[in-house]
Image (cartoon, rainbow, N blue to C red):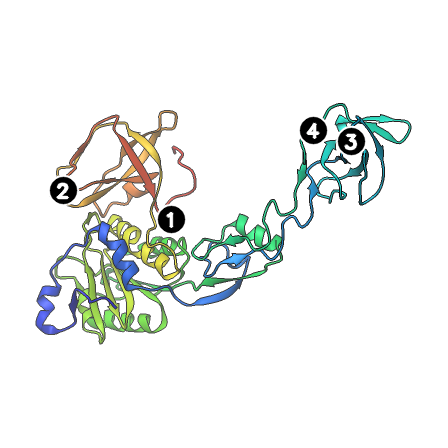
Amino acid sequence: MEEALLSGSPTVFARQKLFKYTRLERLEDLVAGLFAPLGVESASVAEALYRVIAEDVVSPKDLPEFSVSHVDGFAVSECDSKVFKVVSSEVLNWCEAALVETGHPVPEGAVAVVPVESVRFLESNEIVVPRSYERFHEIIRKGSDLSRGEAVCRKGWILTPPLARALLELGIEEVKVYRRPRVLVVPIGSEFTEGVKRESSSVLVKAMCQAVGASVEVSKPVEDSVEAVKVAAERGVDMYDVVVTIGGASLGSKDFTLTALLELPDSALIVRGLAIQPGRVTSLVTVKNKPVVLLPGLVQSTVVGAIFLLQPLIKRLQGDRPRAHYPIGLYRLASDYSYSGRFTSFKRLRFVKLVSEELLEVEVVETPSPVQKAIVASHGFIMLESGVSSLSRGSYVTVYRAPGLYAEGLLTS
């Protein structure tokens, strides 16, 4: 594994508590360099939907296997006349025609299929084709969809429903895919264990993990103590591929999670903070070479940490690119926006809601990090680059989404 930022030695523990904010531009390469995809397994095509293909799959045959008709009509041969003799043969000779149905093989010697409504019938078992047609008109030629030996899907592709249909049509019922990461979500906070407050963020984090392909379990909340966190983390790394903690990570006295993790054998601090606001407390530790993601407890910070560290990590472990968020389009700001905080050197994520479908206009929904309204009311988010403190009304901004955070479509509500 690449050299960690700091080790678990007590002599450097004070330095480990200091944040060394990792910029998002470096994070993707960092995750890709530290963590390799998990093992490969065979799965039925149906079970492998939306998973990452682990090896190239080539077509074992032509598709279609025979040249077939695109319409109900008459397959016709070469002819120097408009009159064709109708036959029921698998081979057409000069100026002959045979009735074919949609999707059925055309006879050998057919050069076109004329739709049945386009011909005129004669009493002498003949038809008249009133005009000439291009060669192979309404014929789907053998191998035109997929040819034998052609790649159907490549290693690293996501198995989508259209790809699954193609595989099944070729008679391929099983494929090699990367194993799904097993993730344990551990909520931390004595307010939960003592019944003072209901724990609710785990359902959000679980959904965001599942949206990128993970198999997820949520543990019971763990109290704010180093020993309790150590027990939960040790169990997690022994049984799961990824452990995610929510809460117990901060700049203050309740920073139990990092303290606990670095007291475990074979632990290393990889990321101590991200250069993004909200979510800057998000961190990454390895224990026994397994990743433990530390998400802040404030809901907006929890979500941002999941978007930029947790989801990319899960994707990487499945052989995919370690990036989860994606653009949905270019929109205009409906009103001015300004930022007066102290994190102008960081990137800043701001949630936005659509205010005009017709004009494709959005406005920033800004609330403090503990307030969930900004997320609930939003339809996506924008990114303010380092050094940018204001955006003018009418400015064009790229709106992004992250898997599992929004329903499909961008509709006003």
Q: Residue 5 vs residue 135: left or right?
A: left
Side of 331 where 156 appears, left or right:
right
Residue drawn at point x = 40 percent, y = 56 percent: 210
Q: Which residue is mark 3?
A: 79
In the rendered image, which residue does mark 1 sit on?
A: 403
Tell me the distance, in whole angstroms, between the alpha carbons under discs 2 and 4: 67 Å
Mark found first going from the N terminus, 3 or 2: 3
Label pair 3/2, CB-CB below 8 angstroms: no
Picture coordinates of residue 401, whole percent (x, y): 34, 43
10 Å crowding of disc 4: few (<14), some (14-19), many (20+): few
Front tag of 3 and 2: 3
Quadrant of the drawing holding the C terminus: top left
Depth-wise, is mark 3 or mark 4 nearer the camera? 3
Secondary element at tag 4: loop
Tell me the amino acid under the disc marked 2.
Thr
Task: Mark 1 and mark 2 in contact? Answer it, CB < 8 Å.
Answer: no
Q: Residue at x 80, y 44 (%)?
A: 91
> Looking at numbered disc 3 in the image, what kind of residue is underneath it?
Cys
Q: Amino acid at mark 1?
A: Pro
Which of the two labelled residues, at mark 1 and mark 4, occupies the earlier sequence position?
4
Residue pictured at 80% horizontal, 26% vertical? 81
The residue to which callout 4 is attached is 133
Residue under label 2, please give it: 344
Q: In 3D space, how far apart are the residues under numbered discs 1 and 2 (Cα atoms)?
A: 27 Å
Q: Is residue 180 above or below residue 91?
A: below
Kind of residue at disc 4:
Tyr
| The N terminus, quarter of image | bottom left
x, y (%) of residue 150? 55, 53
The location of residue 112, given as percent across then percent down, is 71, 35
Of marks 3 and 4, which one's residue comes earlier in the chain? 3
1 or 3: tag closer to the N-terminus: 3
